[in-house]
Image (cartoon, rainbow, N blue to C red):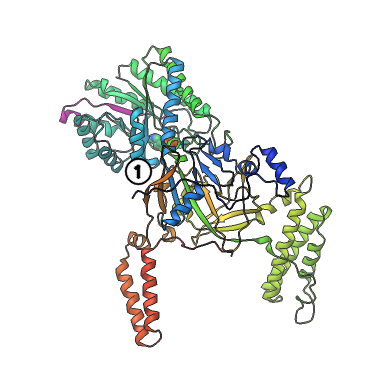
Amino acid sequence: MSQVLPSVTPNPGQPPVPPSTPLASTIARVKAGIDPWTIDDAADLYNLRGWGKGFFEISKNGQVLVRPTRTPGREVNLFEVVKGLRERGLRTPVLLHFSDLLHRRLQDLHEAFDTAIKENGYKGKYNAVYPIKVNQQRRVVEEVREYGAQYGFGLEVGSKPELLAVMGLTSDSPERLIICNGFKEDRYIEFVTLAAKLGRNIIPVIENLTELRLIVKYADKYQIRPKIGVRVNLATPGAGRWRHSSGVKAKFGLSLTEVIEVLEYLKSRGMEDCLQLLHCHMGSQIHDIRQVNSGVNELARIYTELAKMGAGMRYLDVGGGLGIDYDGSQTNFEFSTNYTLPEYAANVVYKIMSVCDEENVPHPIIVTESGRAMVAQQSILVFDVLGANRLDRFTVPSSLETVAKDEHGEVPRPLVDLYEAYNSVTERRVLECYHDALQSRDEAMNLFSVGYMSLEHRALAERMFWATCARVRDKAKDMPKVPEELTDLENSTSDTYFCNLSIFQSLPDIWAINQLFPIMPIHRLDERPTRKATIADMTCDSDGKIDRFVDNHDVKKFVELHDIKDGDQYFLGAFLVGAYQETLGDLHNLFGDTHVAHIRLDDNGNWWIDEIVEGDSVREVLSYVQYDANRLGQAIRHECERAVRDKHMSVAESNALVRNYEAGLAGYTYLETENGASM
Ligand SMILES: Cc1ncc(COP(=O)(O)O)c(C=O)c1O
């Protein structure tokens, strides 16, 4: 489906735009009696310019812009896209793909290595391959194939289904390099051998010695001299969360002794010239450049030794691992990187070149298998907020006498103490009042559990406790040094914003590996966010929450959001979500795939929707778990007819129920509300 949308127009309902420099804007706003909050404050708060790397900005009217080519003026307003999709009947949550951004990333990668090669006088070439496991969606792989053609980029596969998909997608470009990693059985290797005979530039990478014998067997059978690769486990310890992808206990790859055995075996068959590629994978999201340097150094040394021992070495494959700066801190933190892409490329090229020069070995074709760095930034998940739960919304009655007397005409002691604690919060007594509130709340709970306090009084105790905590928290904010015990109050009194998404389906890495993604509102950014919140999803699972957010200095347990009222539409975006997650998501509570929209920019800078892939319907997710929706519908119809027969229901009511059920089966698995509603 291909639909063209009108270009973005400024929102006529917005207040006049303040002057453009941050200081001038602040002064003008103060003079006009407007909150001196600016879009620059918003950009700082969410560190958007840190992790955005020029791909994201905020418009003057406070909406997030995507600049797929990093060019100011060539931009897509996310809020306008959400509105445009709604006009077409497509609701949030929706995953937005920016094809031009993906194109730009491939260009970045090519340019970084091209520059490093030219600056160092490197005599070999650079050949990236995209590991399709990082995002296997057909559209993404097709785009990598299309945009990568001019740079000669190839594809990497890790399984038989991936290989079969890639073979079909590259039938018109047999020269594109295909690297086959992962475990391979007899039929797989026979297929790879025949593909090589067909004229494909395909290299199976040996992960164990059985594969070697199969490669030799089929090379004999089909009379070809295959290109062969070998994956080695480096002694250099791996890096980052996936450091066990490398090292002696790694699941894949051969020890150095086994690599030499491979060469000896090939020599014994007169096939040593077939061993052309050396590969390693040091782990994903490598955050420290020193790790890259020592790994590549060791790999280059093994490469030169193999070349000198007579192998036909031509390719040095440094694997994946090029990281993404998810929090924008550009540090040695696991969700950041302490290096840039040009620095990575320069180091890889320089290390390989210096080792090869030292050993008098020709410079190899450098292969990278960077996946995350190609595709993470092109996807944004946009979802709506359904409502908020605020723990600091409670008030304390002006007098307890009228509302809190028990059957003996007395106010229970814990309530009196909580009342006093609340009313005595001062800067000097914050800690004392907090302790009093904690103790009185516990006493109230104990009295309730032994039957000496009513449900109403227990509820009142809870409300007064949270009101006291909020007061203590606000008072502590003004203190030069906040007592340690109170530092967590900001987190424990933060709101919960209930959002229309399933973390297990759309952001599974948050649940599985505590991944940090930038999450922020996509509009209202010209307005100060006044609430601090964690995010809860729609699943009935307490793990379905987000309580780690990007911070300028650390990881925050809440994100600053805007106050929402009944009927408000409020949208959040999770950014940099394009790597790994799309095929990992699961059907927890039967929330299915979200809609996906592919957004492009035309030559005039207007955006349009290139393709919409509708998310799962309820009928579809039910079929995934072996339900027959037609039979379910029949059963409901039958039950309704019985109710009509027994006069529990009118025919009109029965029709309404059946229609509703059928519309539900055809509908989206997420909530399809018009607006948000405070809870
Ligand atoms: C063999 C191999 N190559 C490449 C990659 C891609 O790594 P990244 O996305 O970190 O670049 C992986 C991922 O783990 C891998 O296992």
Q: Amino acid at mark 1?
A: Arg
Determine whether the beta carbon of the residue marked 1 sits less than 8 angstroms from the nearest atom of ligand 1: no
Tell me: 32 left or right of 312. Answer: right
Residue 228: say if magenta: yes
* Label 1 Cα crowd, 10 Å radius (few <14 / some 14-19 / many 20+): some
Residue 126, relative to residue 25: is it above or below? above
Residue 658: say if magenta: no
Between residue 280 and residue 309, name the one nearer to us. Answer: 280
Q: Whereabouts is ligand 1, in terms of quadrant?
A: top left
Residue 204 figure quarter: top left
- Where residue 367 sits in the image (x, y, percent)? 37, 27
Q: Is residue 629 visible?
A: yes
Q: Is residue 247 visible?
A: no
Residue 424, relative to residue 301: is it above or below? below
Q: Which residues are magenta?
A: 217-234
Residue 644, relative to residue 136: is it above or below? below
Tell me: 628 left or right of 483. Answer: left
Question: In this figure, which residue is indicated by the disc labeled 1?
Answer: 139
Residue at the (35%, 75%) spot, across then down:
636
Residue at the (37%, 54%) spot, across then down:
614
Count of numbered marks: 1
- Where residue 381 sits in the image (x, y, percent)? 47, 49
- Where residue 142 sits in the image (x, y, percent)? 33, 39
Between residue 594 and residue 87, name the one nearer to us. Answer: 87
Residue 354 figure quarter: top left
Label 1: which secondary element: helix
- Where residue 656 sits in the image (x, y, percent)? 39, 76
